[in-house]
Amino acid sequence: MVATLAYTIFPSLAGDKGGLTKLVDPYIGTGGHGHTFLGANVPFGLVQLGPTEPVRGWDWCSGYNYADSVLVGFSHMHLSGTGIGDLGDIAFLPVAQPSQRSMAFSHRNESVAPGYYSLYLDQIGVLAELTATERCGLHRYTYTATHDRQQLLLDLDMGIGWDSTRDCMMRQCDDHTIIGMRRSVGWARNQVIYFAAEFSKPVSMTPLAGDTLALVAADNDGQQLLVRVGLSPVSTDNALANLHAEIPSWNFDEVKRKAMEAWERQLGKVRVATADTAVQRVFYTALYHTMVAPSVFCDVNGDYRGADGEVHHGSFVNYTTLSLWDTYRAAHPLMTLIHPERLDDMAATLLHIYRQQGKLPVWHLMGNETNCMVGNPGIPVLADMALKGCHADMDEVMEALRGSAMLDERGLHLLKQYGYLPCDLDSTHETVAKGLEYALADACVAKVAKKLGRKADYRYFEKRSKAYRKYFDPKTGFMRGIDSQGRFREPFNPFHAVHRQDDYTEGNAWQYLWLVPHDVEGLCQLLGGRKKFVEKLDSLFVAEGDLGEDASPDISGLIGQYAHGNEPSHHVIYLYHYMGLPWKAAPLLRKVMGEMYHDQPDGLCGNEDVGQMSAWYVLSAMGLYQVEPAGGKYAIGSPLFDSVEIDVGKGKTFRVIVHDNSAQNIYVQRALLNGRRHASCFIDYQDIVGGGTLELFMGPVSPD
């Protein structure tokens, strides 16, 4: 059967131009708990076209897990690294018989690279190849001569995780075109997606289950069957317009080449030098993962579906898949460095969402507010961009920040009444986590208010940002739930955790003690001063205790009670810098980078969370990390590379030159910034984006 194919079954990528794309291994993160997307897409594209497997639990949130080997379709929309499954929309499956709904496959028959995916289905003798543009997917199927007909199932019922179809339609317009729509409910409570599929040869469509499943068939004339599919959140007409704008011809190899070139350009914004090719693979795969989302969520004509469910027209690029509770910590600060051209559109997206739903996004998915996770994570993202100089109207920014912080939802009414969130009055639990997140968001509002000279707003939100002190129990030395009478919740065990049913969110008291990145000095005072702060921080990395059988699976990647597999811990190692002890951070940073990330399918110690896990690695491997949630103060860590070149936009480059770097020489001995002594273990955002050179001289022992 294989011998009847007229060309190579597994098209080689070796002949494709590009160097950095070859260092990306999209399998990294598809095993274990990584939940990363595998398939064909372009940077920040809406279409993420790839294989979808039967959902068998939490580790199939992206629709694909490396441990599995059953295919149910090639879907056009996926999530990457989330802890909840959704999407899986508009799926095609090549079949030999109309009754087939799935088939086994082997990873040996897969080939994958940024912008390209192929799989030979030896069970039926069909080679499937996929590539993509921002809003469109392109399929190429080669059937062996044993097939009389080239048959595809078109499935509008398929969904991942919570997703289920509520309404759908498919209609054949002519012998080459099928249009349709799918409305589904899931994590996104009202997701609507329209599609237009054009075929390279005449096809017939036979419904198999109403509008949810159909068989599309063409004569097997020895020619490959190509399908180009445009998506739109607005209409089938817009889906067709997107299709014709982005894939005007049937040249699969040309679309694939452009997709890979798009990835090469974006990956090329950071150039690193090291002799360790495994580290290069981990780094560039991580950088790749940071650009799977946020996703473009508008049509080529500017139409988009807003947070109010209505169709709007914008002069900006609208984005979705905003996992802000995760990504405000590192993914967005990374974006401000390497994607400055996207910041104005990102700010416009947040501001339009504010206008349409009355608050900044919490976790936005396909035009829907999911309200997933806690706090006001849209605030630090918008405030950070505004403080760094994006071109949004600052008065409008302040209105959105203040308006979102002053709502009465999600416990904010209690915060305004009591000055904290009483654990006996907030029925949704997690009051410590929510309170700490609200406090850091309020600090961001205060910073913007101060910049604008709004003294009353500054004083109010600066005071509210200190609310974290209310949860601190000096007797135990931890943040604890406190009731409306001012009593700490009993019993108390700093190790114990119950997934989203206690005072913390996917964590315990050890991990949440440190969630005060906006006021490290204030936390230091609460803990009794610098010496006691450092002693407590040292203890975090060695403390051992039973989390309990109901602990969240997100509490992973443990070093003592430090949990790198979940986002609330991500800034904690860098707190040593605020105590003037960056040398204490260095071995921990190297340990996390060396042990919690590697170049195998289970190469992430926790789920990717839409780029955050990878963004931590990218920044840390370059030797930089922003701890404070807004403003642009980056800690200088322990970089993995001999040199780093960052394209920071406007023709400027920031370089990190690392002298005598090695597995033993992990401590910065001294630093030069643009040739002058740099005594601080921090560097400002403006010094980075202004271009220049940071030289770090490394050694095997601390200089202190």
Image (cartoon, helix red, strand yellow):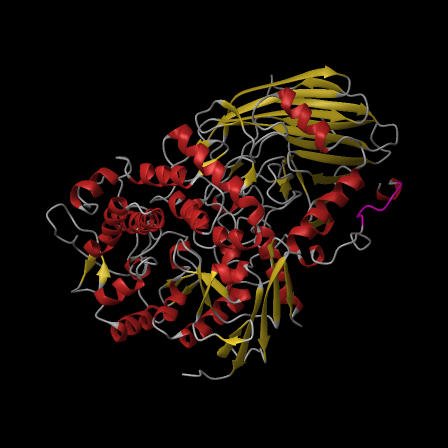
Where's the C terminus, which quadrant? bottom left
Please tell me which residue lies in front, 678 or 376: 678
Please tell me which residue lies in front, 226 or 536: 536
Q: Residue at x 27, y 44 (%)?
A: 457
Q: Is residue 100 above or below residue 519?
A: above
- The spot of residue 124 in percent (x, y) is 76, 37
- The spot of residue 573 in percent (x, y) is 40, 67
Magenta region, mostly helix, strand or loop? Answer: loop
* Left or right: where 134 falls relative to 373: right
Q: Quadrant of residue 271?
A: bottom right
Q: Residue at x 61, y 19 (%)?
A: 209
- The spot of residue 35 in percent (x, y) is 53, 48
* Left or right: where 49 falls relative to 415: right
* In magenta segment, residue 7: yes
Q: Is residue 122 visible?
A: no
Q: Is residue 100 above or below residue 551?
A: above
Which residues are drawn in magenta?
Answer: 6-11
* Left or right: where 248 falls relative to 452: right
Please tell me which residue lies in front, 460 or 98: 460
